[in-house]
Image (cartoon, helix red, strand yellow):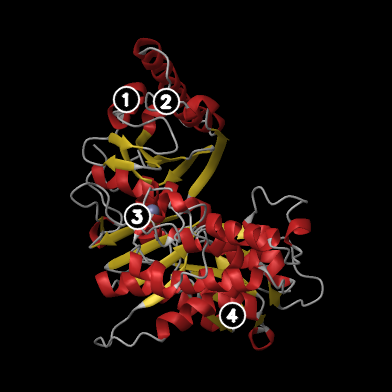
Amino acid sequence: METLHSPKNHYVGVDVGGTKIQASLITGLGSVIANYRCDTPRDSSISNGSDNRDSNSSSSIRHRSVEMTLNAIEESIRILLREQNQPLNEIAGVGVAVPGVVQQETGLVVITPNMNLSGVELGQRMKDRLGVPVAIGNDCNLGTLGECWLGSGRNTSSCVGIFVGTGIGAGIVVENRILNGAGQAAGEIGHIISQIPCEHWRNNINAAKYKQNTKSAKNGLSELPRCGCGNYGCFETFASRTAIERFIREAVARGAKSVITDLNGGTLDIIKSGAIAKAIKANDKVVVPIVRYAAQVIGYACLTVRHLLDPEVIVLGGGVIEACQKFMMPIIDAVVANDQLPSAPGKRRILVSSLGDNAVVLGAVALVRSANGFNPLRKTHQIIPKYPQLHFMAEHVIHIADEPYSKDFFILSDGTIQPRLKLPKKNVHGFRLKDIRTVLSGGVDLIIFGSPHAGEITLSPKCHDYLLRRGIDYRILPLDKAVHLYNTVTVRRAAVWHFS
Ligand SMILES: [Zn+2]
């Protein structure tokens, strides 16, 4: 049995996606030690008996393809651990995230629309293969759980994560636990109907805008795009990357001039979030209004979430937000700020994901730790990192365990010390986003910048905005004051020490 100070304090988090599998070795503190990525087996797309041959052969094909996926998951874990010289029997647990409806308690995958794991007892099957505790959950739920443990949702009692990518996924965490719902389908915010698909809308409000399609005109739905889920008018049909791509393609097909095709490598088959961000930077006349609209829709999705659950924090993440946050967040803020529905004063914030690609694997680890009886979101089960005690010696020297430090270095959130090797050449007292990202990994409430040049240190507006958007506090202080603060605060902290 794991204890808080158990030697078995390493976990594996696995994010099983439709195209990639990521396995990560993670400490009980939440430090990601190593990642291993591989492709999800191609055969995964053969699914759910859709094969039209006789049922025996189709079920054997399905069996084979499920085994291939299970093998790939197991193999990714074994390779990761081998590369890190970490024996599997010293792992305290494995958390697995899958894109679909999952019964967390039993480990059954109810349905995975874009994969072949529907109906598979994934939890038990992986436990049999690995011989360690295994917990499984939905990827967006676990992404939110990860953000609540160590990201932008930390120290909150309620948090909703909304992840904007190919679709819009989401998760709800209340009182340190995922809200699964009676049918394990809570938190499908992307599928909240935002345009009511009724005839009145078609006939009176927006009839001119969309071409009538006689086939579905009968049910009054033709003017709304159909969502991947089968319904009409879902939030994700207006604001996901897929929706943004559709709007761009339609505009370009109508003959609108745009730089997006060139930025996206000469094709509009799949439009990457990075290309969309570049087009915004170039002030593209097609892309800018489309992404502005998508941001407004996401703003209204946040409002809807607030009116339903009123969470302390809504964390926005996913490829579209990561790439376009500078443009989108002020628009989202404006929609939310314009809410006319009164409420009691309280801490309610809309933040951006701090953990990026690691949110899901960290959430998977939080889940298996909870299943082991140690929910890392609960204050009593949190492991406090061992922070070094610093001693201010002189204006340009700090001692840590009698060791003098007089060159730039970081202290990460888990207390480890790392030299800051690459110093900026031009703005010598400036810090780059890369420096900030280095100290942020692993969950931080406060960053302390200590330096004899405290008065000259500048944090670029980009870095300041980055921290503000993630709810992270920072202080720039002279060395002696910074050392004192570092030694005495009780929150999760990181520090940047700047001498040169
Ligand atoms: Zn939908």
Label of residue 219 in the image = 3
Residue at mark 3 to residue at mark 4: CA–CA distance: 70 Å
Residue at the far left in the pictured view? 182
Q: Is residue 401 above or below residue 467?
A: above
Q: Where is residue 453 in the image (x, y as percent from the top left)?
A: 68, 83
Residue type, label 1: Arg
Residue in view at x 38 percent, y 38 percent: 112
Separation of marks 4 and 2 at Cα, in angstroms? 53 Å
| Residue plotted at (35% across, 38% down) | 8
Foreground: 355 or 402?
A: 355
* Mark pair 1, 3: CA separation: 44 Å
The residue indicated by pointer 1 is 125
The residue carrying mark 4 is: 479
**Comparing marks 3 and 4, which lies closer to the viewer?**
3
- Point out the tag, 3 or 2, that comes first from the N-terminus: 2
Query: Which residue, given by chain and number where applicable, does mark 2 sit on?
Result: 70
Of the 4 image quadrants, the one containing the C terminus is bottom right
Q: Alpha carbon of mark 1 to alpha carbon of mark 2: how far?
A: 8 Å
